Image: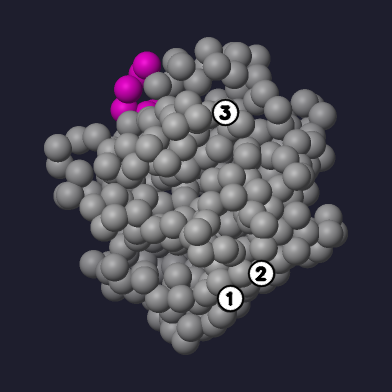
Amino acid sequence: MKLNIQNETSRLRAVVLGIADSNGPVPAVEDCYDPKSRLHVLDGTYPKEEDMIAELDAAAKVFEKYDVKVYRPKVIENYNQIFTRDISFVIEDKMFVANILPDREREIDAIEHVWSQVEKVNRIRLPDHCHIEGGDVMLWNEYLFIGTYLGADYSKFITARTNLDAVNAIKDLFPHKIVKAFNLRKSNTDPYINALHLDCCFQPIGTDKAIIHKNGFLNIEDFNWLINFFGKNNVFEIDEKEMFAMQSNVFSISEKVIVSEVNFTRLNTWLRGKGFTVETVPYTEIAKQEGLLRCTTLPLIRD
């Protein structure tokens, strides 16, 4: 397989889509990896397996409509395998196996049938001290945007998934790229302020536009840089409740086609007003685990 990912929006040809089959029991509060899952466990509203299967199947049908090759992880019994973006990501023709939470290592084994098709020289795993997950990595042509957390209390946050060591390692591997790191706001307990990954508060779309949540960034300079980079008229700003609903976490099939959640009325209206084709799917149950469309997809090949 010849991988090719240069940006977030070129025409998609192949993707790994997560699965919810045999997703396992409702986790204990202390075993939750993010504050939104924790909230729904406490409230008794944690998503049901059958509902999440239906939502992922709806996404798969959209990919089928656009003739996208879809790979799925092999089913591991009683194991959460929904968020494929966490476990791997592609930069240009290189496939990275993410250094993820130790409890989730088996998820990587479940996509062995995918990465085994990639030349060994193009399969990369960073050293153990480099923490990184795909939700923090965004390609935008000559730019590489990476979400991180730079606080001295990094180790205290289960929601801090990408560290500066990983950012520097990526810089070394891609010296021809302009690597821009963004310091994200983290919380282990409050999902209304926690930016679990960069795609929880920002995502570029089309050729020159973006969705952004200002408070996801710890440094106002980072937010202002993005506004200046894309231009204020090209940015759709989402508020705290919309960030909680994961409205920056849509997914581009092409520069003109975006897959979005059916209930994102304000966003979807804006997108259509800007000339995008918006394919809507139900994803509210999956969103209860603090991830949405971008989190459940691992793009392998774009034009």
Which residue lies under the disc numbered 1?
Answer: 113
Q: Outermost residue toward the bottom?
A: 77
Which label sits on residue 191? none
Binning the other alpha carbons within 10 Å of mark 3 as few (below 14), some (14 to 19) or many (20 upward) gives few
| Label pair 1/2, CB-CB below 8 angstroms | yes
Amino acid under label 1? His
Nearest the eye: 33 or 44: 33
Nearest the eye: 60 or 100: 100
Q: Is residue 293 left or right of residue 240?
A: right
Q: Where is residue 19 drawn, in percent x and y?
A: 58, 72
Q: Does dot 3 land on a helix, a strand or a loop?
A: loop
Which residue lies under the disc numbered 3?
Answer: 142
Locate the N terminus and report the quarter of the image it occupies. bottom right
Q: Residue at the spot x=54%, y=82% of the render?
A: 75
Give the distance between the C-alpha atoms of the residues marked 3 and 1, in whole angstroms. Answer: 30 Å
From what the image shows, is residue 42 above or below residue 147? below
Q: Tell me the colour scheme of the image.
A: one colour
Which residue lies under the disc numbered 2?
Answer: 71
- Foreground tag (2 vs 3): 3
Amino acid under label 2? Tyr
Q: Does dot 1 land on a helix, a strand or a loop?
A: helix
Q: Which residues are magenta?
A: 215-221
**Sequence-earlier tag: 3 or 1:** 1
Amino acid under label 3? Glu
| Label pair 2/3, CB-CB below 8 angstroms | no
